[in-house]
Image: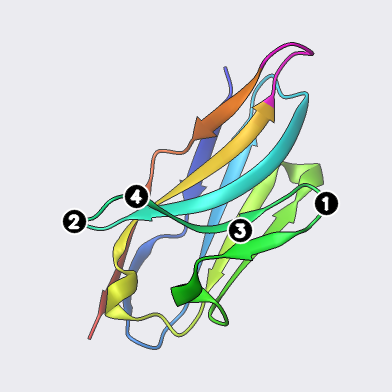
Amino acid sequence: QVQLVESGGGLVQAGGSLRLSCAASGSIVRINDMGWYRQAPGKQRELVASATRGGSTNYEDSVKGRFTISRDNAKNTVYLQMNSLQPEDTAVYYCAADITITTLYRRDYWGQGTQVTVSS
């Protein structure tokens, strides 16, 4: 019953910006870590950014200084603000969340993915 719905992807020129959103809904007791992954054609999925419930963040080296992850815990939503986008950022971006749904069950959930394309 838990689902993550992503939005905000699209086509943008190099140097432009996009903001991705991911809202979790369903039988949620608590959302722990949340993060954004991406997968480009011919490459493995990689972690782009993550955030703990308390606000600690971590970024992949290539996006440091350009991307910002943030959370609105009251809305069960995580965002990824992407600035100074480069063609190398082109990928399908996936939201992921470590969610407790009962006192005994906790696991990762994934969004459907949203395409980000950066043109040169």
| Mark 4 surroundings: few (<14), some (14-19) or many (≥20) residues within 10 A | some
Q: Quadrant of the C terminus?
A: bottom left
Asked whether, in this view, residue 57 is left or right of residue 113, the answer is right
Q: Which circle's residue, 1 or 3, is located before the other in the chain?
A: 1
Question: Where is mark 4, residue-wise?
Answer: 45
Please tell me how many numbered marks the rendered image carries.
4
Question: Where is mark 2, residue-wise?
Answer: 41
Residue 108 position in % (x across, y down): 56, 30
Q: Amino acid at mark 2?
A: Pro
Say if 32 sits above or below 90 in the image.
above
In front of the other: label 2 or label 3?
Answer: 2
Residue 54 numbered mark, or none: 1
Q: Quadrant of residue 79?
A: bottom right
Contact? badges 1 and 3 (CB < 8 Å): no
Residue 79 numbered mark, or none: 3
Q: Which residues are magenta?
A: 100-105
Say if 104 sits above or below 45 in the image.
above
| Mark 1 surroundings: few (<14), some (14-19) or many (≥20) residues within 10 A | few
Nearest to the observer: residue 114 or residue 89: 89
Residue 105 position in % (x across, y down): 68, 14
Q: Which circle's residue, 1 or 4, is located before the other in the chain?
A: 4
